[in-house]
Amino acid sequence: DSGVTQTPKHLITATGQRVTLRCSPRSGDLSVYWYQQSLDQGLQFLIQYYNGEERAKGNILERFSAQQFPDLHSELNLSSLELGDSALYFCASSFRTSGAQETQYFGPGTRLLVL
Amino acid sequence: ILNVEQSPQSLHVQEGDSTNFTCSFPSSNFYALHWYRWETAKSPEALFVMTLNGDEKKKGRISATLNTKEGYSYLYIKGSQPEDSATYLCAWRMDSNYQLIWGAGTKLIIKP
């Protein structure tokens, strides 16, 4: 158990809908990262927050947005969902935002299925 | 283009055999190289973080080496066991202000 929690574990929804994925980082970690893993693809970095501020942006679609709250939990909002958004969404956390030794600790993931 | 490549994509190894696979990254800039292990139905777990050219890290039967000048890292597994079956991911960081760039992984299957 990494100490990172994600809810829900599974989500089934329809095209055009909007969903919110939630992540609570490990106690004491200030950075939260969101990743997408589609079928037969590697981990795609979406976005990173550090202590409430957006720190880095990867291949995140405009239909997706995220935020990190004062209690450091983070939410990833996916809107106007398409079939291709079906994927496993991971959240990871680390203490800082950078540093060579900075290990990311991954949550169990949310599996999203768009029908 | 900042690209991290892992080879092979997948690997079938007989139980008890040793194996190794490669992570290649741009050699022009280097800050750190991470290895993660990702078992099916679980989430990725950190194995090693490597920062210096010539670094060697070891955890049980798993070890890794790093060559930053030529831009590659090897992961070795000695005497493979069924519990070693997983996808092994590497991730490269080019400097302290940049996020990790992830490889697509090597899927290792150990045949009993």
Image (cartoon, coloured by chain):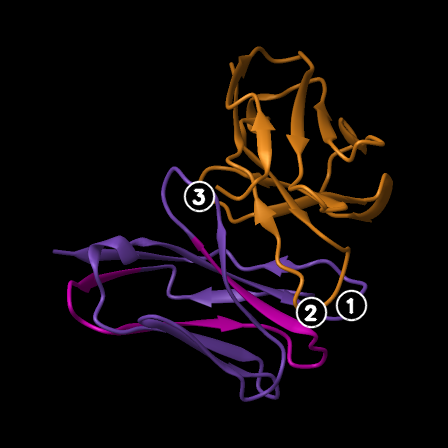
Chain colours: A orange, B purple
* In the image, residue B102 above or below residue A51: below
Label 2 belongs to which residue?
A100
Q: Position of residue B54 (x, y in %)?
A: 54, 89
Q: Residue at x 21, y 71 (%)?
A: B79
- How many marks the image carries: the answer is 3
Q: Which residues are magenta?
A: B11-37
Label 3 belongs to which residue?
A40
Q: Residues within 10 Å of mark 1 (few under 14, many from 20)?
A: some
Q: Position of residue B7 (x, y in %)?
A: 41, 67
> Which residue is the extreme one toward the left?
B112
The lab-note entry on whether marks 3 and 2 share a chain reads yes
The lab-note entry on whether marks 1 and 3 share a chain reads no
Which amino acid type is shown beneath numbered disc 1? Ser
Host chain of mark 2: A
Label 1 belongs to which residue?
B96
- Marks 3,2: beta carbons within 8 A: no
Mark 1: secondary structure: loop
- Marks 1,3: beta carbons within 8 A: no
Q: CA distance from mark 3 to mark 2?
A: 29 Å
Q: Residues within 10 Å of mark 2 (few under 14, many from 20)?
A: some
Which amino acid type is shown beneath numbered disc 2? Ala
Which quadrant would the C terminus of chain B be assigned to in this image? bottom left
> Which residue is the extreme one toward the right?
A53
Which amino acid type is shown beneath numbered disc 3? Asp
Q: Residue at x 65, y 19 (%)?
A: A81
